[in-house]
Image (tube, helix red, strand yellow):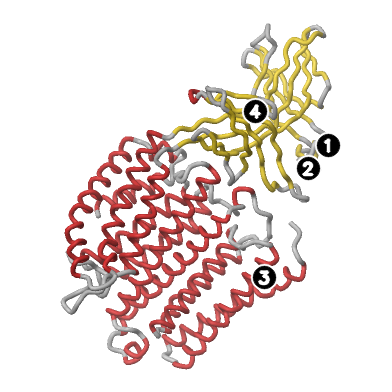
Amino acid sequence: MILLLVIIGFCVAGSLVSSPKAYFSSWWMRSIAAVLCLNLFLCSVKRLPAALANYRQAKARRAGAFGTWLCHLGMLLVVIGFAAGDFLSEEYSIYGIPGSMQPVEQTGLWVRIDDFEVQMRDDFTVEQYVADLTVTDGSGQEASGSASVNHPMNAFGYGFFQDSTGWANTIDIYKDGSLQRSDIVCVGETTCPDDRPALQILFNKFYPDFAVNETGSYYSRTPLLNEPRSLFTVYYNGEIKGMDFAAMNTAVRINEYGFVFRDPTEYTLIVIRRDPTERMVGIAALIMLAGIFLAFYWRPVYGEEGGHDDGSIAE
Amino acid sequence: MTTDPLLNKIESAAFPAVLAVYLIATAFYFVFVAAKKEKAGVFAYRLMIAGFIAHTFCIAVRGVNAGRLPLTNQYEFAMAFAWGIALCFLIFVKKYDFNALGCFVAPVIFLVIGYAAMQSKDIHALMPALQSNWLAFHVCTAIIAYGSFGVAFGVAMVFLFREKLQSSAFARMHFPDEQMLDTITYRAVSLGFLFLTLCIVTGSIWAKRAWGTYWNWDPKETWSLITWIIYAIYLHLRLNKGLRGRKSAIFAALGFAAVIFTYVGVNTLLAGLHSYR
């Protein structure tokens, strides 16, 4: 009981921290989970003989005798499965525009984004994000499908989840009028001339339908590409040299350099996950639910000698 | 999102009516218990039934207008939460012939609908993450769980209140004895606990489909777990340590405080995946 109260205390604190995942993966939370597992294990061992005795004594609804025991067992397996998942699960992410192909870290998989569509309603609210993907493994086997929110694609034991989206532009960098570099840059990323890495161009924000309101604030009227503008900042040796909007296909000049924003496209971020303990946790949760149901709603019917009206089990 | 102006008007008219009926029922329950007026109790119960019918109608109109289950924002869930408490209340009153319970449950229903009144009633199209059949299972189980815990809270308050009226003939006639009150609280908590567990499990399945992980330590998830543990302690103490009486009632009331914080506090004070305004 003290342990459960301690867990409540830690959970309350965990709900207030800025990065709860790190908090709940800390060594002290793992230690508490280990103590909880030990406690649940001992409880399960201790309860089993009593559950068996109740099972033998019961005249009807005998399975109910295992209710609380199953509940404890299910909870034990959920905690073990969740803790194991913390160590065994894998998570990667890739992002890119349609046509791009990315490796998925050490998995040996490659993901090609065949297409990406943001399906909108008439009022410009998003109906669905759909990414068509082709996944290739090390042996050259291919799997194609689409990933949308609530409908992940599954291939090679991994789940591919449509996570988020944003805008990308192609930025062409010229030096003395000749093309030096062409980069696809997402909002928040930087690019620079090949021979002058100290000159950084940060792509701050994208307005697909640029407008200015009465108070002078910038906004996008619609998410459609009617009047696209890109907000950028130029840094030299880490110092801000300027910030401005660029229209598409219009050159911006800085000394001998020029750069052009073009081809605005929405990129997609795909999260790739695998958790081998998921099935175990699912089964454990079902065991726990079955245990709760049996404990409260399938109470054993005993003979004249016993049975507890409130559902408690003879120890 | 385009909605039917007629249905908007019907809902706008029905909502204050529901609020008013529950408020009047609350007032009559107070008259029933404080002034010991039998007729006030009967009238209050009839008002609760009328309120529940109007409430159901109000939710149904919104569902038809939105073209989906109206369970996806603070207003809609507050309405459904109050509906769940009202449903559980009517079932428990019928089962245990315990109308005085309304004295403590009707104000909770009124307050939850009052909270709904402070929320935006605009109907929005669903964002992609909310377009899942698991959402319906998840929220429906939450409604029954929260409704049962609301009733357990009401019975627990009756238990604590009854101690002050022990010798009164009115109390003997309208309040079950302490043992029965204790059993009703236990039954309501065990029903709520089963559905809260189902709610957490269905929510985890939905989270797995939408975000790829079944548990994200989102504040709402964490507080649901806290609420679950509080009620698990209550049931554990009751089944194994013989927790009964006043302590049991205080525990049930504390559990409901956690439910309210999980619902209102987390949504307003702590941002997370569940912050659908």
Amino acid under disc 2: Thr
Can residue A308 be seen in the rendering of this structure? no
The three-letter code of the residue at mark 3 reads Val
Q: Position of residue B128 (x, y in %)?
A: 63, 48
In 3D space, how far apart are the residues under numbered discs 3 and 2 (Cα atoms)?
31 Å
- Is B97 placed above or below A129 here? below
Q: Distance between the residues labelled 4 and 2?
A: 23 Å
| Residue where numbered disc 3 is placed | B61
Q: Distance between the residues labelled 2 and 1?
A: 8 Å
Closer to the camera, A301 or A170? Answer: A301
Q: Which of label 1 and label 3 is nearer to you? A: 3
Residue A96 tag number? 4
Q: Which residue position is annotated with label 1?
A: A226
Q: Residue at x 30, y 65 (%)?
A: A295
Question: Do tag 1 and tag 3 residues touch (Cβ < 8 Å)?
Answer: no
Dot 1: few (<14), some (14–19), or many (≥20) neighbours within 10 Å?
few
Residue A254, numbered label:
none
Q: How crowded is mark 2: few (under 14 residues within 10 Å), some or many (20 or more)?
A: some
Regarding residue B118, the answer to whether it shows in the image is: yes
Q: Mark 2 = which residue?
A: A222
Residue A91: image location, x then y, percent: 48, 33
Q: Which chain carries label 3?
A: B
